[in-house]
Image (cartoon, grey):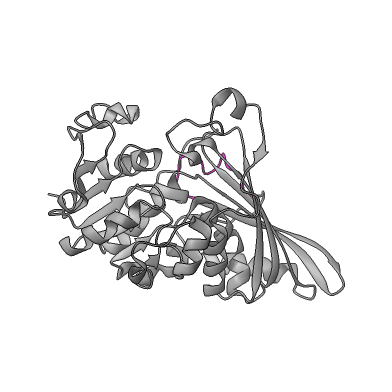
Amino acid sequence: MKRFKAAIIGGSGYGAGEIIRRLLLHPEVELVRVASIDYVGEPLGAAHPNLDGRTSLRFENLPPEEAAQGCDVVLFGLPHKVAAQFVPRVLPTGAKVVDLSGDFRLKSAAAYERWYGQPHPCPELLAEAVYGLPELAREAIRGARIVASPGCFATATELGLLPLARAGWLAGRVRTVGITASSGSGAAPSAGTHHPVRAVNLRTYKPLTHQHVPEIVETLRAAGAGELSLEFVPVSAPLSRGIFASSFCEIDAAIPKADVAAAFQRAYEAEPFVRVPQKRLPEVVAVSGSNYVEVGFEYGPAEGGRRTIVCFSAIDNLVKGGAGQAVQSMNLVLGLDERLTLEDPGGYP
């Protein structure tokens, strides 16, 4: 018999589908309820065809406190600005919360209002929420009541730059270009995800104004970076899954390349889901469909006592950039091996 029970609130989207898939295979956690305002009464396969016939569960339109009854953990797949209205109603049930939206990632209510365009509905919970990047906050996640799972762009960018931040070398201006897949826009069709346009196109959106900027800066500062600014340009690409981030920064020209390589190895040698390829740079195809991350760097020329470093990272936006990372945090919250249901390597090519 499985030891823990879980529910999902907001269960019809792509991220929720990936959570459901992982939980149906989980040896210790039983998925008992999936709440959604879409597909009510229909089997989960109605929204997630790959799960057709895998479970007898159906989508239920339930109040959050009812969805959480008897559960050890509730995973939220609701949009930004919606999740925060329901999380406070789940907490009195005693269930832990893992939220995939951006509603609890920032510590400042003023920053939330600036970047998300409305006041936070429960600012008193922001200080309590733990940012769910296991590579940075594993022990804090274990004891959390609310885990704010990071954004997909944020995960890729942070993991690419984390070794420099931990070494104390990251400061000043950072410029990042993040290339992303169409599934990051969600299951509802839009002009940005319409296949005839997306499949033959590259375009930017929210340049310099994307809501992941403040969480990236906040996270890197917490990891040891100095004062820094981030100029972030997201690019929509003809992929269904994946993110590739290239982050340009400067370090002291006297720091040897071997020291930078050692910083990357030191940061991730004990991490189960982060790889530092030795004979190639990161690629999306190597991590697509999996919870793994690839990171690497290019050691650039020196000029005026400074040296350009480009940090590269590749993730699957729906797994390590979303549902997989949420399950990884859920495992930690429940005192389980964080690798459970997440060690499959994905396919190639």
Find the residue positioned furthest to the top. 196
Read off the magenta span. Answer: 282-292
> Is residue 114 toward the left or the right of residue 19 in the image?
right
Tally the marks.
0
Q: Is residue 53 above or below residue 65?
A: above
The structure residue drawn at horizontal position 18% and vertical position 35%, both measured from the top left corner, is 57
**Residue 169 visible in the displayed image:** yes
Residue 299 percent across, percent down from the top left:
75, 61
Between 168 and 258, the residue placed more toward the observer is 168
The structure residue drawn at horizontal position 40% and vertical position 53%, both measured from the top left corner, is 81
Residue 104 percent across, percent down from the top left:
40, 62
Q: Is residue 180 above or below residue 131?
A: above
- Residue 287 is one of the magenta-drawn residues: yes
> Is residue 210 toward the left or the right of residue 142 in the image?
right
Between 233 and 3, the residue placed more toward the observer is 233
**Residue 337 visible in the displayed image:** no
Between 47 and 303, the residue placed more toward the observer is 47
Find the residue positioned furthest to the right. 304
Between 4 and 208, the residue placed more toward the observer is 208
The structure residue drawn at horizontal position 65% and vertical position 71%, both measured from the top left corner, is 228
Place residue 229 in its image quadrant: bottom right
- Residue 33 is one of the magenta-drawn residues: no
* Quarter of the C terminus within the rendering: top right
> Is residue 336 toward the left or the right of residue 300 in the image?
left
Residue 123 percent across, percent down from the top left:
37, 68
Q: Is residue 329 above or below residue 198?
A: below
**What secondary structure is the magenta-colored segment mainly?**
loop
Q: Is residue 13 above or below residue 231?
A: above
